[in-house]
């Protein structure tokens, strides 16, 4: 029998509560349990609903006048938006930290309206800050990642959804925009595509330009890896196990053309200087085109006969202007013969290719079996003259050996002033002895230490070797040609483009215009393209149509270069077409190059411009990769498809008028001409 309750109302005796619970029937117990579960779910749903209502998917973390950075919770990403419309400019997926739900900001950043900080305990710190603009009309945000443990690898990925990206590295099958390229994560260092086709090419820069008007510039002292995932994103990441920071600048401009113009200011104390324009063919004697010598190289006597034979044939076909280019092996053979003759008191013939000019080729490599390297060993100069491994305590330096053109070689130590002075003096002496007008330097690109997983000296980290050597080679005169460009676009040097395959693919002809736009965007306007028809073996070698379409493009580039002469590959009409193209280059193209070369020097605008230069907000212009502008006034739209005699042509610049130089027909800018005729003998060219 239950006793009446006689107790204080604020306390429930445990014994009575337990006794009452025991007396409950099973159905009542089930009802109470269900009620508890229902209350739990109701509370959970309420909390989730409150979070959804009170915590938006995006949260402002730093706001400027033109835009601002938001944190997107769903995917753990920074989003840059333009104000006042809120237009998305860039989306950066954050990797390497549990970023889906960031912690609250640190107090020391909270009170500063120009900064914002996140800190992931034991992982990494992220600091965002508004920075002074590098040019009027843009707004910049610094992104600084700092790892808190050595094993933390930082990784930021920039989405390609609705954004076309330009700049960064050259690649084997160049794309414009970069969205179509594919590359595994690898150090952002220049390389030789002939020996490493899956690596990055010889011309690159640490900035990426987005079609939305955003520019991403990685800090110059930050080592990083770059990966390209076609049509998804590109990623910047830090090397594993080294606790390296990741720092870059996000700059927002009104559109992509404005963003590029804001990059035009050269670094402090680095005024731009163009190379000598004589190679363009701007004044007599005409020094364009370049004819690559491909004759016998067994001995110095055979090379001299081969050079004289090439010059005679050029005269016979009325092509007796330009430069004959001798490769590195032929140069080395002539150099050895010249030295032997000099020691014997004999004089060598200097006018090897008159009335043409001669270019010779050198590199910073020396075979370990060469007299050059062996002499340095005998005089005890090897450790200082050649790149060496860092010695262990109490040990001595040994040269860092690498492979160059199939031989085991040592590489010039460009950080040793004595070695560099010796190398430059040797180049000048050889140029004078052989009567060469131009010096070509191969093998400038690449990091020999990185290739062998050896820690480099601080001054040779990244592309330090290419930068130091390029600056030294620029002192040889403005007729110097180098094989790489990394932070040297302001120097008076020609840059030789990577070789292309003899076919119609993006590794061949289709990659030529994307490469032109890429080189010029990065400031390398005075380049020498690969030889007409391509110099690497392909599936269309000896194809007259490929030769003609290639010839039509290089007619509008700084220098026309030939490997196989036109009389060997094609019918007589192609030889006649070659003469016409050479005259057009001299009379029509060179004046344009000089005019817009002066504009590049003053303002930093590229000479060869993409369609979006005149249509910076037209999405159609962002992916045009088979046309290019020379300055603002000439549009070249060649054929790059085999067997095609027509093409679609996008005419940029709404409100402008374009004149077809062949038919004198006039068309409106901002429109697309469908199925426009272009026979094998012509290339569509329009003047604004």
Image (cartoon, rainbow, N blue to C red):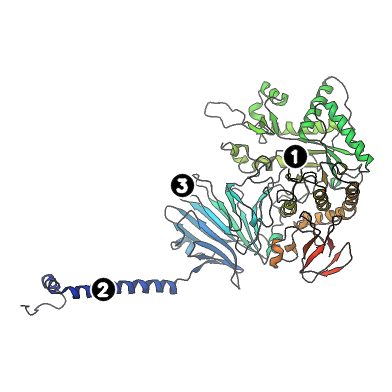
Q: Are marks 3 and 2 in contact (CB under 8 Å)?
A: no
Residue under the image location 72 percent in, 63 percent down: 612
- Locate residue 580, reporting x and y percent: 90, 51
Q: Quadrant of the N terminus?
A: bottom left
Marking on residue 151: 3
- Locate residue 559, reporting x and y percent: 82, 48
Q: Is residue 136 visible?
A: no
Marking on residue 44: none
- What crowding class fits label 1: few (fewer than 14 Cα within 10 Å), some (14-19), or many (20 or more)? many
Marking on residue 473: 1
Where disc 1 sits, the SS reads: helix
Where disc 2 sits, the SS reads: helix
Q: Are marks 3 and 1 in contact (CB under 8 Å)?
A: no
Q: Which image quadrant is residue 340 in?
A: top right
- Locate residue 198, reporting x and y percent: 63, 45
| Residue at the far left in the pictured view | 1
Q: Earlier in the sequence, mark 1 or mark 2?
A: 2
CA separation, marks 1 and 2?
84 Å
Q: Are marks 1 and 2 in contact (CB under 8 Å)?
A: no
The residue that label 2 is drawn on is: 34
Q: Earlier in the sequence, mark 3 or mark 1?
A: 3
CA separation, marks 3 and 1?
40 Å
Asked if 617 appears above or below 241 in the picture, the reply is below
Where disc 3 sits, the SS reads: loop
């Amino acid at each position: 029998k239950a006793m009446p309750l006689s107790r204080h109302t604020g306390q429930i005796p445990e014994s009575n509560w337990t006794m009452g619970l025991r007396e409950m029937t099973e159905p009542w117990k089930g009802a109470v349990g269900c009620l508890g579960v229902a209350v739990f779910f109701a509370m959970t749903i309420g909390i989730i609903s409150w979070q959804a209502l009170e915590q938006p998917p995006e949260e402002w973390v730093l706001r400027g006048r033109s835009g601002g950075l938001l944190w997107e919770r769903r995917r753990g990403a920074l989003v840059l938006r333009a104000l006042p419309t809120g237009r998305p400019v860039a989306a950066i997926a954050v990797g390497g930290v549990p970023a889906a739900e960031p912690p609250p900001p640190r107090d020391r950043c909270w009170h500063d309206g120009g900064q914002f900080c996140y800190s992931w305990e034991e992982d990494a710190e992220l600091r965002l800050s508004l920075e002074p603009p590098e040019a009027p009309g843009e707004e910049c945000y610094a992104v600084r990642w700092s790892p808190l443990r050595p094993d933390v690898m930082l990784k930021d990925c920039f989405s390609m959804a609705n954004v076309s990206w330009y700049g960064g590295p050259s690649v084997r099958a160049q794309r414009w925009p970069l969205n179509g390229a594919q590359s595994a994560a690898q150090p952002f260092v220049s390389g030789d595509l002939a020996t490493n086709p899956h690596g990055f090419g010889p011309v690159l820069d640490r900035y990426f330009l987005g079609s939305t008007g955003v520019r991403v510039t990685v800090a110059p002292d930050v080592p990083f890896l770059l990966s390209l995932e076609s049509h998804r994103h590109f990623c910047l990441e830090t090397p594993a196990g080294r606790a390296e920071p990741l720092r870059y600048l996000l700059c927002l401009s009104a559109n992509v053309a404005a963003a590029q113009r804001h990059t035009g200011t050269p670094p402090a104390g680095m005024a731009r200087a163009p190379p000598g324009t004589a190679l363009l063919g701007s004044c007599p004697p005409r020094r364009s085109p370049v004819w690559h010598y491909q004759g016998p190289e067994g001995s110095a006597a055979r090379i001299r006969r081969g050079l004289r034979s090439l010059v005679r044939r050029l005269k016979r076909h009325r092509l007796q202007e330009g430069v004959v280019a001798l490769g590195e092996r032929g140069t080395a053979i002539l150099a050895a013969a010249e030295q032997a003759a000099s020691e014997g008191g004999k004089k060598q013939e200097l006018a090897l290719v008159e009335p043409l000019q001669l270019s010779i080729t050198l590199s910073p490599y020396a075979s370990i079996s060469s007299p050059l390297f062996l002499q340095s060993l005998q005089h005890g100069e090897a450790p200082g003259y050649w790149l060496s491994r860092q010695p262990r305590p109490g040990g001595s330096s040994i040269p860092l050996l690498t492979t160059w053109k199939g031989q085991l070689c040592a590489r010039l130590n460009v950080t040793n002033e004595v070695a560099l002075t010796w190398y430059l003096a040797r180049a000048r002496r050889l140029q004078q002895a052989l009567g060469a007008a131009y010096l070509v330097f191969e093998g400038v690109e690449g990091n020999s230490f990185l290739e062998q997983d050896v820690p480099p000296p601080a001054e040779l980290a990244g592309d330090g070797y290419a930068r130091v050597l390029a600056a030294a080679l620029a002192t040889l005169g403005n007729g110097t040609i180098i094989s790489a460009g990394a932070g040297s676009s302001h120097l008076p040097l020609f840059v030789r483009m990577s070789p292309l395959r003899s076919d119609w693919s993006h590794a061949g002809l289709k990659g030529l215009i994307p490469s032109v736009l890429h080189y010029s965007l990065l400031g390398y306007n005075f380049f020498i393209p690969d030889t007409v028809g391509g110099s690497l073996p392909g599936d269309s070698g000896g194809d007259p149509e490929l030769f003609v379409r290639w010839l039509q493009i290089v007619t509008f580039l700084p220098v026309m270069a030939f490997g196989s002469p036109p009389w060997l590959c094609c019918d007589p009409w192609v030889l006649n077409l070659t003469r016409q193209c050479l005259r057009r280059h001299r009379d029509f193209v060179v004046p344009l190059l000089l005019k817009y070369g002066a504009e590049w020097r003053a303002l930093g605008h590229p000479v060869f411009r993409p369609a979006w230069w005149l249509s910076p907000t037209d999405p159609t212009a962002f992916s045009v990769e088979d046309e290019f502008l020379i300055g603002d006034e000439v549009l070249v739209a060649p054929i790059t498809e085999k067997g095609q005699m027509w093409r679609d042509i996008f005419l940029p610049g709404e409100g402008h008028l374009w004149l077809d130089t062949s038919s004198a027909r006039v068309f409106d800018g901002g429109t697309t001409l469908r199925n426009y005729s272009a026979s094998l003998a012509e290339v569509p060219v329009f003047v604004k």
